[in-house]
């Protein structure tokens, strides 16, 4: 059977950075060529970055993407790489699409192209467009209607883009009908907890359906609240894993494959869901036999907590770097949330780029002050103390506040202090709120919610503790100092805005609360369904009311890394003005 060495470049690109992304694509193509690759591939919309969102509706950006693609093809040829076919995702438009109501203006397309000999040898657009969760592709794109097949060294390679594999029908069965020897799918699949297992089973199933070896190339890195975990796969027609790339790691998965020879006559006509076969022959003859040098293999999988922690680190690093910042600042209260966020930031950026500020008030306990200082010593981050008592006293003298207003004032003074330091010193402010608190509105607008990024915004409080304990254990296993003080892990959580305050004064026990929230927020279950699972009815009503009443607060919270199937933000969109109540 013909042989083919395929280079799957699992890389990180940035939305809108066309020149930078072009340089990245050239770098990895050179690397693949040096490794003797015969076919090089890059992820979905690698040239433009992903997701481009409403940039797709801007004609100037679409044309810039098309121009960058043509330039990339020319530069590959100029650098002596023109004979190497390169498959790259980009933003295109459909010239045939007429303007009509309900379709995106300008007919933009989530597309990919095969570059060869300085030109675009083949171009195609995503057929299945996702319109759920964080995806709004009906808003942005018009679908493709072809089955693209490119013949490389005597092998017919069918091409697809992400959702073309996730949905039934379309290009997968069409690949079998066309008799392709390899199905190559370009993807920008965002990370979610446990998604790697789902992805593996999906690719195995699609390989069986397509009747051929299937390569699933994924993106890595981060973009706004999305993180991409890589985890690229190559699977045999019977579902056996041939190769699997590391998670959250940029690199080239190089695989030698033996594939069925293409038919003498190229496939043509219409297959599957009315898809027209678009076949291009780049090299008809198989390569002379050569000894395989790369046999793939499976990279070791990360266990659950390590996977989540790594995703959070990648999210912080990407957001800070891609937005042009070099350092971050956050309040260190001595509590578990700020301790975990500070540790994540140190792992993402290096401790010298992390600035922690203790801002004690009249109600701050001594152990909170010492725990914050201990965390700073353990991690090596830059640490300072700014007492807020005099500032609070000045407000109180002018306004005469009491009760909740006085409590929230302390938080808002802290927020103002952090933003002032951000303006003065150029740090990006990290907000330490977790998903449990955001769900219930247990935060102060313009206080502890101040910031440009919320690293644990999609992490329930129970998982905050689990991740902190995992990080400490991982440090101990490597013979290093655990970053988070033990006292921070064992003391009852408190906002310390009044004497003796504890979180449990306002919220149910976090273990119970998080299980209710997971059902209501992530699972969209109603009151009756949750109660039927054994939860107290009065408690469920109380929690659901808190969640519903806090929508306006969540709308004003900064973006943060998404790790669940439904995070606050694009995943979950509810009206702020909403009088519907479960079971009312």
Image (cartoon, rainbow, N blue to C red):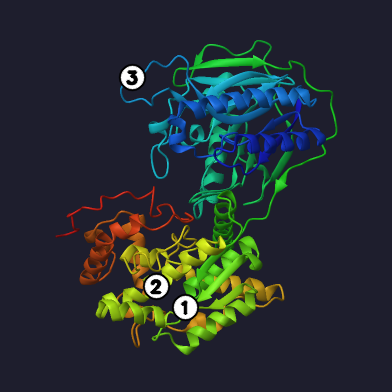
Q: Secondary structure at mark 3?
A: loop
Closer mark to the observer between disc 3 and disc 1: 1
Q: Is residue 405 visible in the rendered structure shown here?
A: yes
Percent x, y for residue 573?
32, 48
Label 1 with label 2: CB-CB less than 8 Å: yes
Write down the residue under mark 3.
100
Q: Quadrant of residue 320?
A: bottom right
Q: Secondary structure at mark 1?
A: loop
Q: Is residue 236 visible in the rendered structure shown here?
A: no
Q: Can you name the residue that lies furthest to the left here?
A: 584
Residue at 64 percent across and 22 percent down: it is: 70
Q: Secondary structure at mark 2?
A: helix
Nearest the viewer among 464 and 103 is 103
Nearest the viewer among 309 and 516 is 309
Write down the residue under mark 1.
359
Q: Quadrant of residue 476?
A: bottom right
Q: Quadrant of the N terminus?
A: top right
Residue at 51 percent across and 47 percent down: it is: 198
Query: In the image, is residue 103 above or below residue 332?
Result: above
Left or right: 406 with respect to 155? left
Query: In the image, is residue 274 above or below residue 467?
Result: above
Percent x, y for residue 150?
64, 20
Q: Earlier in the sequence, mark 1 or mark 2?
A: 1
Q: Earlier in the sequence, mark 3 or mark 1?
A: 3
Percent x, y for residue 347?
63, 64
Left or right: 537 with respect to 136? left
Query: In the image, is residue 204 above or below residue 436?
Result: above
Gap in angstroms between the C-alphas marked 2 and 3:
52 Å
Left or right: 414 with respect to 547? right
Closer mark to the observer between disc 2 and disc 3: 2
Label 3 with label 1: CB-CB less than 8 Å: no
Write down the residue under mark 2.
413
């Amino acid at each position: 059977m013909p042989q083919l060495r395929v280079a799957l470049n699992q890389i990180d690109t940035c939305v809108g950075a066309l020149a930078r992304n072009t340089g990245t694509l050239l770098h990895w193509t050179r690397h693949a060529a040096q490794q003797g690759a015969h076919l090089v591939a890059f992820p979905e919309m690698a040239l433009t970055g992903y997701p481009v969102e409403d940039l797709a509706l801007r004609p100037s950006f679409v044309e810039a993407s098309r121009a960058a693609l043509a330039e990339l093809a020319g530069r590959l040829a100029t650098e002596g790489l023109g004979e190497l076919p390169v498959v790259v995702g980009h933003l295109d438009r459909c010239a045939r699409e007429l303007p009509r109501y309900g379709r995106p203006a300008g007919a933009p397309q989530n597309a990919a192209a095969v570059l060869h000999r300085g030109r675009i040898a083949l171009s195609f657009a995503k057929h299945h467009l996702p319109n759920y969760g964080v995806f709004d592709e009906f808003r942005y794109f018009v679908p493709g209607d072809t089955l693209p097949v490119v013949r490389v060294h005597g092998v017919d390679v069918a091409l697809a883009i992400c959702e073309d594999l996730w949905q039934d029908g379309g290009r997968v069965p069409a690949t079998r009908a066309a008799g392709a020897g390899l199905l190559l799918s370009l993807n920008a699949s965002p990370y979610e907890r446990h998604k790697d297992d789902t992805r593996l089973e999906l690719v195995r199933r699609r390989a069986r359906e397509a009747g051929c070896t299937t390569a699933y190339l994924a993106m890595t890195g981060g973009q706004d609240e999305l993180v991409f975990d890589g985890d690229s796969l190559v699977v045999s027609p019977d579902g056996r894993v041939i190769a699997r790339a590391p998670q959250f790691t940029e690199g080239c998965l190089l695989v030698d494959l033996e594939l069925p020879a293409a038919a003498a006559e190229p496939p043509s006509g219409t297959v599957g869901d009315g898809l027209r076969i678009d076949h291009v022959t780049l090299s008809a003859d198989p390569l002379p036999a050569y000894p395989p040098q790369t046999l793939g293999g499976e990279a070791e999988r990360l266990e659950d907590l390590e996977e989540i922690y790594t995703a959070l680190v990648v999210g912080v690093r990407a957001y800070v770097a891609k937005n042009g910042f070099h350092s971050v600042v956050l309040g260190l209260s001595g509590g578990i949330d700020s301790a975990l966020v500070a540790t994540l930031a140190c792992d993402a950026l290096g401790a010298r780029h992390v600035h922690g500020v203790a801002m004690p008030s009249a109600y701050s306990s001594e152990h909170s002050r010492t725990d914050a200082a201990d965390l700073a010593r353990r991690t090596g981050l830059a640490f300072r103390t700014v007492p807020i008592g005099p500032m609070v006293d000045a407000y109180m003298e002018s306004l005469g506040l009491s009760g909740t207003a006085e409590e929230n004032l302390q938080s808002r003074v802290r927020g103002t202090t952090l933003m002032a330091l951000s303006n003065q010193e150029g740090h990006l402010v990290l907000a330490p709120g977790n998903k449990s608190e955001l769900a219930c509105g247990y935060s102060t607008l313009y206080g502890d919610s101040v910031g440009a990024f919320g690293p644990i915004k999609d992490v329930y409080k129970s998982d905050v503790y689990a991740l902190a304990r995992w990080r400490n254990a991982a440090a101990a296993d490597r013979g290093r100092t655990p970053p988070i003080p033990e006292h921070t892990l064992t003391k009852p959580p408190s906002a310390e805005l009044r004497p003796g305050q504890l979180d449990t004064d306002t919220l149910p026990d976090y273990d119970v609360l998080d299980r209710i929230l997971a059902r209501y927020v992530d699972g969209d279950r109603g009151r009756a369904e949750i109660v039927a699972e054994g939860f107290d009815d009065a408690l469920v009503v109380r929690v659901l009311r808190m969640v519903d009443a806090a929508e306006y607060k969540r709308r004003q919270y900064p973006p943060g890394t998404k790790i669940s199937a439904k995070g606050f933000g694009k995943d979950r969109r509810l009206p702020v003005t909403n009088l519907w109540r479960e079971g009312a």
